[in-house]
Image (cartoon, helix red, strand yellow):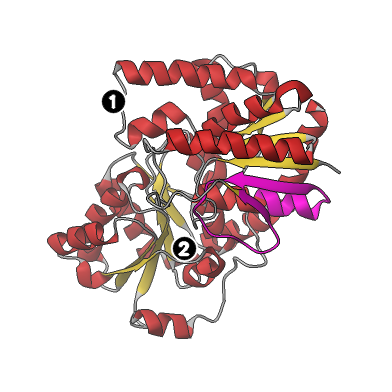
Amino acid sequence: MYKITTIAPTPFFADRGAHVRILEEVKALTALGNEISICTYHNGRNLPNLDIHRIPNIPWYNKLDAGPSYHMFYLDLLLVLKSLMLVHTTRPDIIHAHLHEGALIGKFCSGVENIPVVFDLQGSFSDEISAHGFIKRDGIPYKISHRFEEFLCTLTDAIIVSSAKMVSVLKEEFNVDGGKIFVVEDGVDTDIFKPNIDISNLRKSLDIPLNKKIIVFLGLLNEYQGVDYLLKSIPLVLEEIKDAHFLIMGYPNVEKYKEMAKKLGIYDFVTFTGKIDYNRAHEYLALGYISVSPKISETESNGKLYLYMASGLPTIVFNNQVNKSILGKLGVYAKSKDYVSFANGIIKLLEDEELTKRLSTKVREKAVEDYSWRHVGGKIVNIYNKVL
């Protein structure tokens, strides 16, 4: 097969969605016989059986959560140097670049060797930094960022996206040739993420009563992931469903959202776990009766949905094309950025046991049939074949 340099301008691995996609793609491609080296930031967790190369340690920078940072300018310069050395010594067949900075670094490193660069894009960079409050959507910095993003898309030989929505965005907003765009959805290991796992000890350790229906959320705790909408919906749910309990798993901002829960009068009905190890995520999800994902982005993939589906969890989401492309008719959809509508979706599933059981079976079946990582790996290899 192929020798691949993966460029990941992020603190890989940090138990969050974008990193899960990188990890599982690497594992799937390795299982198909490819040889992969990963070039990434200094921080993040090393994982077994992965060839990870890091920039020099920067002791004052330890941010692990998503979102832009001014520190990334010099971190990415160091990553350019590290990637250049790695490409020079390993002579890869393909550079697989994650995120927009990775695409720029990858193109620079391809150099005189003219190594094909595949850009693995997880959403619009301009929209992401706007959603995180880094720039205003109607300002000049946004327009500059948008133009730069359009330029980046011209540099690489192929672009991988995770949804049909992102194909439309690239073609219509960034003038990208549709012939170089390939849809590769996220995936899930359905042998690990599955229902009916023995989690009695875990439930006891979290001190959640046995007579509660648990609504689970797994992801980063920030406005971008819709956590504010989720917490605002909970009082409305509790008015109708007395045995509901919410298990909110993730980081950062745990104390911020605990305080918000106290102010809303729902603290006793919510358990915050903080950061959990991805290797144990399947156990925590197995505690759930249903799941929620109030993510507000309409272009980025929503990787947690695959984990929910494999775990047999019916899911409430906001109504957008990305979520619908994953869940199809099996999702419960709320109006975008409407916590009342979101609460009504939760109530609907908690009240209708027959619907919940039917969706539980169907989402698990769809995950097994359509979203295996081996299938994802095969799709990526086919893209490599096209650009070589």
Residue 163 point in image, percent of width and height: 57, 35
Residues in magenta, as a range: 25-53
Q: Quadrant of the N terminus?
A: top right
Judged left or right of residue 216, residue 233 is: left
Q: Judge whether residue 137 is colored magenta.
A: no
Mark 2–mark 1 contact, CB under 8 Å? no
Separation (CA) of disc 2 from disc 1: 40 Å
Quarter of the rendering occupied by the C terminus: top right
Residue denoted by label 1:
136
82 or 149: nearer the viewer: 82
The reply, left or right, for residue 339 in relation to residue 21 is left
* Image point (25%, 48%), residue name: 340
The number of numbered badges drawn on the structure is: 2
Nearer to me, 341 or 154: 154
Q: Residue at horizontal 40%, vertical 29%?
A: 127
Q: Secondary structure at mark 1?
A: loop
Q: Residue tagged by mark 2?
A: 356
Residue 163 showing in the rendered view:
no
Three-letter amino acid code at disc 2? Answer: Thr
Q: Position of residue 265 (x, y in %)?
A: 15, 65
| Residue 111 drawn at (x, y percent) | 71, 23
* Secondary structure of residue under mark 2: helix
